[in-house]
Image (cartoon, helix red, strand yellow):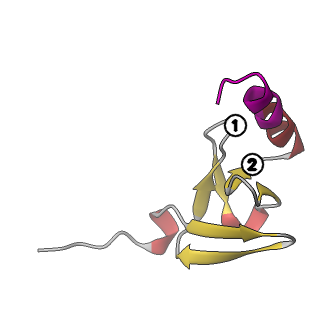
Amino acid sequence: MLTSIPDAQREAQMQYFDGHYKMLVAGAYVICAATERKIPVEILRYWSVDLQEAYYDAEASHARVKQLAAGDG
């Protein structure tokens, strides 16, 4: 028997564009690529179109750029 996870407990799958995103799989949150924190979809404001990654805030976005520049990511 298959059981489904309610959207409120599921990680959303997104496609990121300049200035907006498209939810491919319904869910309540995405994971920050820099901090691994859950980001509630309703407060998602930072992401990379090129890397298709979400970030918790501007500081996490900057940390991820530095991580990638250092070759750690």
- The mark nearer the N terminus, 1 or 2, is 1
Q: Note whether 18 is above or below 51 in the view shown.
A: below
Instruction: Tell which of 30 and 51 is nearer to you.
Output: 51
User: If the image is split into quadrants, where does the C terminus sit?
Assistant: top right
Query: Which of the 4 quarters of the picture holds residue 36?
Result: top right
**Residue 7 drawn at (x, y percent):** 47, 73
Q: Residue at x 36, y 69 (%)?
A: 5
Q: Is residue 67 above or below residue 18?
A: above
In the structure shown, which secondary structural element does the residue marked by tag 1 occupy?
A: loop
Q: Position of residue 57 (x, y in %)?
A: 83, 46
Mark 2, residue position:
55
Res. 35 image quadrant: top right
Residue flagged by tag 1: what amino acid is it?
A: Ala
Q: Is residue 37 left or right of residue 43?
A: left
Label 2: few (<14), some or many (≥20) within 10 Å?
Answer: many
Residue at image coords 54%, 66%? 12
Majority secondary structure of the magenta segment? helix
Determine the CA span between mark 1 and mark 2: 7 Å
Q: Which residue is mark 1?
A: 34
Q: Is residue 66 magenta?
A: yes
Q: Position of residue 66 (x, y in %)?
A: 82, 28
Q: Which range is magenta?
A: 64-73
Q: Where, quadrant-wise, is the N terminus in this rendering?
A: bottom left
Element marked by disc 2: strand
Q: Residue at the location (77% across, 62% down)?
A: 43
**Mark 2: which amino acid?**
Tyr
Tag 1–tag 2 contact (CB < 8 Å) = yes
- As drawn, the label of residue 10 is none
Asked if residue 8 lies in the magenta stretch, the reply is no
